[in-house]
Amino acid sequence: MKIEEVDVLIIGAGPSGCVSAAYLANNNVNVKIIEKSKFPRYVIGESLLPRCMDHFEEVGLLESLKKQGFEKKHGARFLKKEKVCNFDFSLKHTEGWNWTWQVPRADFDNTLANEVQKKGVLIDFETEVTDVEFHDLYVLTSVKGKDGKTIQIKSKYVIDSSGFGRVLPRLLNLDKPSTLPKHSSIFTQVKDINRPVGLEGTLITFDILETQVWFWVIPFSNGNTSIGFVGPTDFINSYSGTPEERINEMIKTSPYFKSRFENLEYLFEPKIIRNFSKSVTKLYGDRFVLTGNSSEFLDPVFSSGVTFATESGLLASKLILKELNNKKVNWNKEYVDYISEGVNVFTTYVNEWYTGNLQKLFFHEPENKEIKKQICAVLAGYVWDKTNPFVTKHNRIVKSITHLIDLETETKIIN
């Protein structure tokens, strides 16, 4: 059987894999990507956070993305009946990017893959990992190409950036249940012919229909808009019929967006992902590391997926480069602890979103501008900023403030 040799093999050509590959290629590491799909291909995760712009800039991918004219995202809007809460990324506690993009991922990921290939990285598309063997000094990965032939790739390290494909968690039995509630989503895209002009037509919006049920609206610069509903799995399953019939009925429950999206033709049959939250027993092992959604996926409510993918992908490649240069790496401290800090912050916010506490804080009036700036920094992806109390005290601060809001409300009722 044919055997190829590289320094680092990356599974998956999404944002995490491409950022990893770009960093390693910039540092003259021989790297190759195996990608199961044919690009361009559809994938979910169309709303980015400002934090990931730092990653694209650092590895030299930003300029190619800027040329694509993707819809700029300067913040986000949350609706709950007649209440409105707007977040402006320029008004956040942490210094950093004040904007990012809303992107059709097929185009976005294809741009990244093309740019990485220009850096000399080989990408084998329509190629599937079938087996992996770990040895003392190398990893032997078996892959099957679109021609049906199997070859083996010998590498010093493997980075699993396979996203929802979760290649190594599946092959190595690393999956474990998520601690988050079981939620599901149904989504599609439309040609947004009823889109209002100006900011209203381009602003990403989260329409809260019930405490645990919400509707996303993500407009793209090409005139299409991504729409989707998220809620408890039982809620999604409570609608009968085809996926198209289900989402038709759900759209009717959004008074704000019903007239804009009702009766529009869908660009593809609505897709359903059930129980989307995922976790793993470990993030790394001897000669492998998991990044992005192949390791953990939380919830789409705060659009954290791509940012965690690029954050972990870049860090993994930096640590591998250190070891290739014969420098010692403490993977628990430098990778697991660091990534877990950010994941834990977002996990708190996801949990407090679905308890209703965070929603209560969002819509409380009069708003506290300093608190809002600190929350905005979290929503922008800067969840490692230790100067932000909504990062360092994440596990109690939302509960504490909403408790004060409840006491204030009770006092007003009594008086």
Image (cartoon, grey):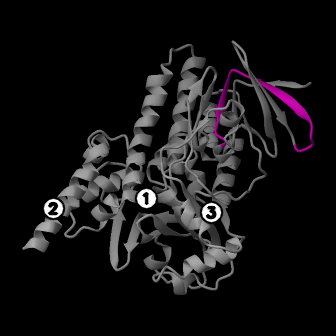
Q: Quadrant of the C terminus?
A: bottom left
Q: Which mark is residue 99?
A: 1
Point out the residue furthest to the left here.
415
| Local SS, label 2 | helix
Judge by depth and name the residue closer to the eye, 79 or 122.
79
Q: Quadrant of the N terminus?
A: top right
8 in relation to 415, above or below: above
Instruction: Report if residue 380 is visible in the image.
Output: no
Judge by depth and name the residue closer to the eye, 146 or 230.
230
Judge by depth and name the residue closer to the eye, 263 or 119.
263
Check disc 3 and report the residue beneath it: 104
Check disc 2: other Cα within 10 Å, few if <14, some if 14-19, many if 20+. Answer: few
149 in relation to 323, above or below: below
Residue at point 38% right, 73% down?
80
Q: Which mark is residue 407?
A: 2
- Identify the mark nearer the N-term, 1 or 2: 1
Q: Which amino acid lies under the numbered mark 3 shown in the image of this protein? A: Pro
- Identify the mark nearer the N-term, 1 or 3: 1
Left or right of 176, for residue 119: right
The answer to whether the residue labelled 1 contacts the one labelled 3, judged by CB atoms less than 8 Å apart, is no
Q: Which amino acid lies under the numbered mark 2 shown in the image of this protein? A: Leu
Q: Nearer the viewer, mark 1 or mark 2?
A: 2
Q: Is residue 345 magenta?
A: no
Label 2 to label 3: alpha-carbon separation: 44 Å
Residue at point 40% right, 69% down?
77
| Local SS, label 1 | loop
Q: Position of residue 88 (x, y in %)?
A: 35, 63
Task: State which quadrant residue 117 falls in.
Answer: top right
Q: Which mark is residue 402?
A: none
Residue at point 55% right, 49% down?
277
Give the magenta part as a residue range: 146-162
Q: Position of residue 261 (x, y in %)?
A: 58, 82
